[in-house]
Image (tube, grey):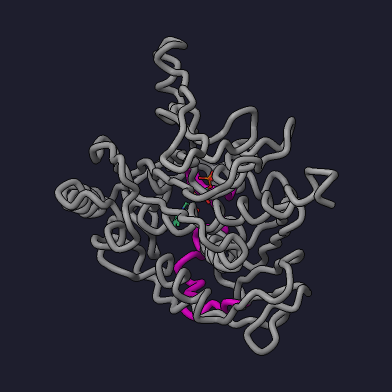
Amino acid sequence: MGNQFGHLFRVVTFGESHGVGIGCVIDGCPSLLPLCEADIQKDLDRRKPGQNAITTQRAESDTCKILSGVYRGKTLGTPICIFIPNADARSGDYDEIAKLWRPSHADFAYDSKYGIRDPRGGGRSSARETAARVAAGAVAKKLTGNLNIRAWVESVHAISMPTVRQTPTLEEVDATPVRCPDIPTARRMEEFIKKARSEGDSLGGVIHCRIEGLPAGLGEPVFDRFEAELAKAMLSIPATKGFEIGSGFAGTCMTGSQHNDPFCLDENGGVCFVKNHAGGVLGGITSGATVDFRVAFKPTPTISKEQHTLTITKESVSFSGKGRHDPCVLPRAVPVVEAMAAIVCADMTLRNLSAKGKEI
Ligand SMILES: Cc1cc2nc3c(=O)[nH]c(=O)nc-3n(C[C@H](O)[C@H](O)[C@H](O)COP(=O)(O)O)c2cc1C
């Protein structure tokens, strides 16, 4: 089953959007790491719904509880279970969904696969599940310590911010509701999202993420290359449609001489690179350069515009989305991208401990 991610740092998420609650179990987290609910809560607060006028108005505080694996503020090395109750479940909003397949949602696919689905808010397929990933990511960050993992909204529809050399800070990213660190671009994006919502429509875009501070050597060729694990982590987030690392698709329009990243030495005599088209990975193994990647998100499938669809008995009907939803998922997906990146780094760090025979 596909409810687990990671090899040594293993995360299982559980729960449905309008059930009792959601959460995660982390098996493989080493002992003696400092951990308390406040460490997790600050990340959950960045993802929670109802933050501002451009997110869903579902009112969830997403207050987490650590049920196991921690004693007197330290991890025990035993499974860590984190639970987040669902407080604002309004299942009545979703009665109609039980009888039809919403366009671009998972309803038809879940019916086809399981022969049953929880229609309340999309059940298991709802992105509410990503709160559990953010909780697990907060634990992963304890293990990866001094890494700087930072994501931000780079574009919404056709509105893009200029490319930045310097990775934005958390404060710069969170300065606006859109989580785009370029303020004039963020303002334009915000207006465009509000316009789309007022027209009963929705928007997608691109999230850019960087991981700074990773040592050279993480990644397990050939099938578990670092970028392959990262791509899987990112494409497991609902509504994602693309992943690119380093130069990505744009690199196809360069020549080898333009694309290659020459080696050089930094001021301390360490190996570094003149540029970073590789995105921080060579041969599936981190090179010590910044890991740099982008994730594409589609427009939110729930829109209040009238659409054609089929009922579960295959009758043609028109449907418009009711209930609460995000007109653009990107601002709330930023902490989810960071959390999944942290989980990959934690897992790959543990896996790398067995790489060199002489160090065992
Ligand atoms: C943070 C986040 C919030 C989301 N919020 C909504 C929402 O409010 N309404 C909605 O229809 N889809 C939302 N989605 C997207 C759906 O969960 C997703 O598109 C749907 O389950 C179908 O899966 P797929 O797009 O991966 O095929 C959200 C996704 C993320 C990552």
Residue depicted at x 60% and y 75%:
21
Using the image, determine if residue 86 lies above or below residue 299: below
In percent of the image, x 26 and y 53: which residue is there?
197
- In this view of the protein, can residue 115 be seen by the observer? no
Q: Is residue 286 above or below residue 167?
A: above
Residue 313: where, in percent of width, then height?
Answer: 61, 46
> Does residue 166 appear left or right of residue 266 in this picture?
left
Q: Nearer the viewer, residue 69 or 166?
A: 166
At a point 64% along the width and 32% down the height, the residue shown is 284
**Is 243 located above or below residue 55 in the figure?**
above
> Quick one: 34 or 252, which is closer to the camera?
34
Q: In the visual, does 356 lie left or right of 37?
A: right
- Left-right relation of 184 to 177: left
Q: Residue at x 80, y 50 (%)?
A: 359
- Residue 174, horizontal then vertical, whole percent: 30, 62
Magenta residues span 83-107
- In the rendered image, which quarter is residue 223 located in? top right
Residue 13, can we see it? yes
In the rendered view, tell whether residue 82 sits above or below residue 125: below
- Expressed as whole percent of the image width and height from the top left, the position of residue 172 reads 27, 58
Q: Nearer the viewer, residue 97 or 272?
A: 272
Quick check: is 92 in the magenta stretch? yes
- Left or right of 352 in this view: 37: left
Q: How many marks?
A: 0
User: Can you name the residue that lies furthest to the bottom here?
Assistant: 72
Q: Is residue 255 magenta?
A: no
